Image (tube, helix red, strand yellow):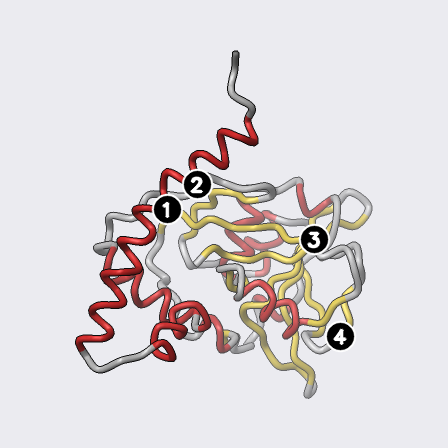
């Protein structure tokens, strides 16, 4: 008789309780040895930053097992470069389909969550997030930060557009990870379509986003 899947799952959990207890016991003894108490132990549960620090100590750099792609995630090669010539950009997107903020004399600044990102060329895992409701930029960034993602910069959005050119014809794709100022307003990169054309455009960071918009994030 085959074992019920629910029973099998419970059995798996029970069989691992011994190991879980051993891990807790080792940590608890180490905390006690330094004069700590239950208040210190509770920090492990309540503080995500401390959890990441523990994981960094346990897992040597470069030995992480790559997590498989989830729904709406993409492997994207990123060179962290982008033409500043109008003609070259329009050849990639469409005639008159590129905002001058990408080729004019505009300085783009990273969002604080992207200030120290690694810009070594290579593959990145990107998530095309659909919140399905009206949203605001900072709230989106904060929500996805808790899930292990940061917003994509304009250079990462450009790389995503090169790797997945047809997606932007379906819906707006917003990159909140970098912005530039024009006329006192703050603008971010937007990939979108218009009458079959591919557009590299902009929109205001401080606006309210529509429920149909998608947002590009990068797995940390």
Q: How far apart are the alpha carbons under marks 4 and 3?
A: 17 Å
Which residue is label 1 attached to?
17
Q: Cβ–Cβ below 8 Å for labels 2 and 1?
A: yes
Crowd tier of the residue under label 2, counting other residues whose Cα lies within 10 Å: few below 14, some 14–19, many 20 or above: few
Which residue is label 2 attached to?
13
Residue at 71% in and 78% down: 206
Q: Which of marks 3 and 2 is in front?
A: 2
Q: How far apart are the alpha carbons under marks 2 and 1?
A: 6 Å
Which residue is label 4 attached to?
207
Residue in the foreground of this view, choosing between 54 and 167: 54
The residue most toward the top is 1
Residue at 68% in and 47% down: 168
**First-in-chain label (1 vs 4):** 1
Give the percent coordinates (x, y) of residue 209.
76, 66
Q: How far apart are the alpha carbons under marks 2 and 4?
A: 46 Å
Left or right of 187, for residue 53: left
Crowd tier of the residue under label 3, counting other residues whose Cα lies within 10 Å: few below 14, some 14–19, many 20 or above: some
Which residue is label 3 attached to?
130
């Amino acid at each position: 008789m085959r074992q019920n899947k629910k029973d099998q799952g419970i059995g798996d959990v029970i069989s691992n309780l011994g190991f879980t207890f051993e891990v807790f016991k080792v940590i608890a003894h180490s905390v006690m040895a330094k004069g700590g108490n239950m208040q210190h132990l509770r920090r492990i549960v309540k503080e995500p930053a401390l959890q990441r620090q523990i994981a960094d100590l346990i897992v040597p750099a470069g030995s992480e097992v790559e997590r498989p792609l989830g729904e709406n995630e993409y492997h994207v090669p990123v060179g962290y470069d982008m033409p500043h010539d109008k003609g070259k950009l329009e050849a990639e997107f469409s005639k008159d389909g590129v905002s001058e903020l990408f080729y004019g004399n505009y300085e783009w600044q990273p969002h604080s969550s992207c200030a120290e990102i690694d810009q070594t060329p290579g593959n990145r895992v990107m998530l095309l997030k659909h919140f399905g409701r009206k949203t605001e930029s900072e709230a989106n960034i904060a929500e996805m930060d808790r899930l292990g993602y940061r917003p994509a910069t304009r250079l990462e959005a450009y790389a995503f557009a090169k790797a997945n050119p047809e997606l932007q014809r379906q819906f707006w794709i917003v990159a909140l990870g970098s912005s530039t100022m024009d006329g006192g307003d703050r603008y971010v990169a937007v990939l979108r379509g218009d009458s079959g054309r591919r557009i590299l455009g902009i929109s205001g960071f401080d606006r309210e986003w529509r429920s149909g918009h998608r947002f590009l994030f990068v797995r940390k």
